[in-house]
Amino acid sequence: MELLEAKNIKKIYTTRFGGNQVQALKNVSFSVEENEYVAIMGESGSGKTTLLNILASLDKPTSGEVVLRGKKLNAISEKEISAFRREHLGFVFQDFNLLDTFSVKDNILLPLVLSKKSINEMEERLKAVASALNIQDILNKMPYEISGGQRQRVAVARAIIIKPDLVLADEPTGALDSRNTDELLNLLNQINEAGQTILMVTHSTKAASHAKRVLFIKDGEVFHQLYKGDLTNAQMYQKISDVLTLLAKGEQYE
Amino acid sequence: MNSFFYLKLALTNLKKHSKMVIPYLLTSTLFVMMFYVILSLSNHSEFYGRTRGVLLAFGVIVIAIFAFIFLFYTNSFIIKQRRSELGIYNILGMEKKHVSLTLMFETLIMALISISVGILVGSLFGQAIFLALMKMVGELPVMYFEITWNSIKTTILLFLFIFLCTMVYNISRIHLSKPIDLLKSKSEGEKEPKAKWFMALIGLVCLGSGYAIAILITNPMEVIMLFFVAVILVMIGTYLLFTAGSIALLKLMRKNKKYYYQTQHFISVSNMIYRMKQNAVGLANICILSTMVLVMLSSTGSLFLGIEDSVQLITPKDAVLKVGTDSFKEMIKVDQSMMEELKSYDKKDFVHNYQFSATAALANETIQFKNKTLTYESDAYYVMLVANDQNDLKENEVRVYFDDGTKLETLSIGNKNYHVAENTSSLKGYEERDITRFNPGFKGLVYVEMPSYKDVYDAYSSIDENEFTYLNQPSFNYMFDGELSDQQKEILRQLPSNIMRQAEGGYYYHVSFQDDLRKEQYEFFGSFFFLGVFLSILFMIATTLIMYYKQMSEGLDDGKRYEILQKVGLSHEEVKKTIHSQILIVFFMPLVMAGIHILFAFNMIYRMFEMFGMINKLLFMEITAGVFVIFSFFYFITYQCTSKVYYQIISSRRRT
């Protein structure tokens, strides 16, 4: 079943006084199945962050539409969009985006508090998520007291505690060292195996090689896609590298 | 090295930081101006060495000290915000001495602008301020604001010194820190403040005891002695409660899960914990400055506007003469001579009587002048016994007045029984309000009009002086309205002593003229009020500036937080609501606290006023309330303007 569908997404940025126009996305269409793990790859400037922002309803496309579980994002009013976002989407950011004024526990609970859940429910969900991500011991610490890897795990916990339809990860390994990157990627695989749909934007080949499917974006268009199938991470890594090499060479790949 | 380059860099820096620099520049210019004006006034030939001059000189010192502290404080705030920028210069290859040179140019430019503009504007507006002052201190000969090199020189020297100090401080900061420290962002990894319960408790105790002193102490002498104790206790209490108390309270709120895990409270409480850590001292400063402004304006204003009341109280008529001797026989002789001398004067509403006053108990229709049995003033009546020169009372008759409305048939005074001819509510020679206000703090006031001087003297003689703590000797009073020339006044001043020099035994007298007293009071309380207004403006500017910088630094810190919150799913509206309620609390907490301080201080200040003769409680109340309303209004405007800055910073952050 299709969970997310992006149809003919186009995004043009204009400067404030309407002078220059920059086309960030030309025409992007793709869909994400339930329980999939999709990575979107592309060089910086290829429009992948713009795409993620549009999928996350943080930004609006110039034309085209995004449909999440049968619901058109464009049709949701400005008032409801925040509530929609926090109930259906989970976010993991490159720079973690934890609030330094909250303890780890409160950071994770934040979306639940915003959705006005009962305290009992909050604690129950927290327990489940914390043990799944192995962060029970640091719940009462402040973000600055824990390591980068731990911070990203807390951010993942915050994203999945609401049981979202889709987790959107923006360059989640970007600020991590290689050991923490491995840990996080394995964690994402685990979560995915447990039934969580994930869409990740990255330019790290290693991160993308963990996904079930990789989409390549170039110059605002979907350029190519790869399915992992039964390949190992290493094999997938090689395949992605090949595509990237072709991408770098330019238009020769048809 | 080309120092022109650094001058240019300094100029660019100032322009780049105009949001921080301009308010600072404005404030320092205003300080220069105010200092210069008040210094010129206190040096003015009409003021120097007189009461008003001394008060103004006091103001000069206060402003100088305040300007120093305040400009230094603001400067340190600005330099803190610019740390990472200075670090970048350093890393880009500028040596510390080059950065210092840039900072030096910056300070010099600012000093040059604020000192020159301040003195210029001060000279222009000096005359206007001067006229305002003259209006307050009463009629003075037509004078002009004097622009003297002396005042200009002092002003320049003082502010150059202040700017030099800030410069040395800034440069020392660079020399003391490593570039890597300069680069580091300050908000990263800030520790959560600990709840200091003990400190919060001490704060509560200090504030409570300060308030208790203010309410419970009624004895005027003790009030003066303890006023500063109360002020210091309240100040300590305010600082501790803002710093430790607020965090303790917020942590308590956080412990209550039901309360804490609600959208609104969740974000506010946790944000406030951090906000209070950084801003508690600033908020306490605002609170204390606000309280100072309120107290200063309401008290100097009340004293000034209450001048007429106290003048009327002390000298109910244009001329008031009072003479007394030890013996009654001499007294009658002196009275006759006095009356003889006063004959030639044009006297309107002439009051001539013999009287004394004392504290006494009243029981069984008897006035008992034995107040040793009375432990407290509040158990005693204040009794005035008066005999007017002409009266319609028969022998053994008295007319009585009780301000509490007591009515009597008979009255015994010192072994003698009198029939009460009339229970009156108006008495010759005094207006009722004078009587009722004569001596606050007693159970009540009793005014007894007796048939003859002898009756009054006999009542006085019946008193055993050892039994007494509060007694006014009997005296003859002569009060009348009428125009008096300076020469006549001088004669009247000498008159009692000339007459009584021939009398046997000791004597005493007192002569006062209403218009002289009025002039004196206007000069004193007028200068006082002027100073109050002047300093209030200064403090209010300071408060505004603190608030402005507070909003700015908080906007910078909070911007990132709200950005994250929005990404996680807080709507724009909700963000706005949270921000709004938060600023509101932070902003109006000091004002509310200041209001509470004033409420408690009211009684104590009023007790002190009584000694100045300002006893119009209602007037004081009205003025205090009025000042509070006006101040709140300005405060609110400040809030509006500065919170706009905050929103701007936050939303500009969101756009990027």
Image: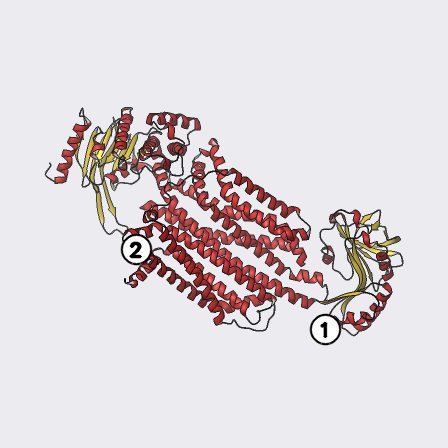
Residue labelled with disc 1: B490
Does A73 sit left or right of A110 as displayed? left
Residue farthest toward the left in the current orientation of the protein: A252
Does B473 sit left or right of B605 as displayed? right
Amino acid type of the residue that numbered disc 1 sits on in the rendered structure:
Glu
Please tell me which residue lies in front, B99 or A212. B99
| Image vertical order of residue A125 relative to residue B65, above or below | above
Q: Residues within 10 Å of mark 1 (few under 14, many from 20)?
A: few
Amino acid type of the residue that numbered disc 2 sits on in the rendered structure:
Glu
Which mark, residue B381?
Answer: none
User: Residue drawn at (55%, 67%), measured in percent from left and top?
Assistant: B42
Provide residue A192's location: percent of width, then percent of height: 27, 26
Provide residue B151's location: percent of width, then percent of height: 49, 69
The quadrant the N terminus of chain B occupies is bottom left
Residue farthest toward the front in the current orientation of the protein: B176
Chain where mark 2 sits: B
Q: Secondary structure at mark 2?
A: loop
Please tell me which residue lies in front, B402 or B315. B315
* Residue B28 appearing in the image: yes
Model colouring: secondary structure
Please tell me which residue lies in front, B558 or A220. B558
* Residue B615 appearing in the image: no
Chain where mark 1 sits: B
Which is closer to the viewer, label 1 or label 2? 2
Provide residue A168's location: percent of width, then percent of height: 28, 33
Please tell me which residue lies in front, A105 or B407. A105
Which mark, residue B95?
Answer: 2
Q: Residues within 10 Å of mark 2 (few under 14, many from 20)?
A: few
Q: Quadrant of residue B470?
A: bottom right
User: Residue drawn at (36%, 60%), measured in percent from left and top?
Assistant: B104
Which of the two discs, 1 and 2, labels the residue nearer the N terminus? 2
Q: Secondary structure at mark 1?
A: helix
